[in-house]
Amino acid sequence: MTVLTEKNLNDILEYLEKSISNLATDAFDNLEIEGGIQGVKSFLENQFDIRLENLLIAKKSSIHHLESGMKNKVIIKKQKIIESVSKKYDN
């Protein structure tokens, strides 16, 4: 496994933000996911986790190999992204 730099993590999180925002647009517009808005939020959270792990694997790393500060950064960023995309569609 490779130690991930702060810059690499920031790049991954920036990419994920765009990716999840685009996915949210489609998901909320269609609302075909079971559970309505809460189901879409759950779907987006799962997609964030899956895509994050895939991007980390591509960098020869894993969420399990990040230091705690980086893990906290990922958690906070995930919450902000989900809150941000959800606010757009709560109205």
Image: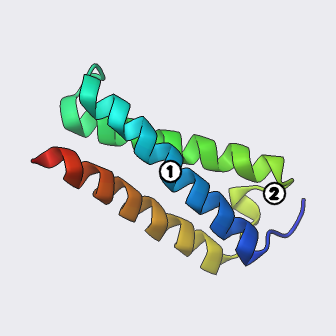
Badge 2 element? loop
Q: Residue at x 40, y 58 (%)?
A: 81
Tell me residue 24's x, y (percent). 36, 39
Mark 2: give few (<14), some (14-19) or many (20+) Cα within 10 Å: some
Q: Is residue 13 visible?
A: yes
Residue 18: mark in rendering: 1
The front one of 49 and 24 is 24
Circle 2 is placed at which residue position? 61
Residue most extreme to the right: 1
Q: Residue at x 45, y 59 (%)?
A: 78
Q: How is the image coloured?
A: rainbow
Q: Amino acid at mark 1?
A: Lys
Q: Upstream in the sequence, badge 2 or badge 1?
A: 1
Q: Nearer the viewer, mark 2 or mark 1?
A: 1
Labelled pair 2, 1 in contact (Cβ < 8 Å):
no
- In this rendering, would 60 be left or right of 11? right
Estimate the spatial distance between the alpha carbons at disc 2 and disc 1, rounded to whole Å.
21 Å
Mark 1: give few (<14), some (14-19) or many (20+) Cα within 10 Å: few
- In this rendering, would 52 be left or right of 84? right
Q: Amino acid at mark 2?
A: Ser
Q: Residue at x 90, y 59 (%)?
A: 1
Q: Residue at x 22, y 50 (%)?
A: 88
Tell me residue 77's x, y (percent). 47, 66
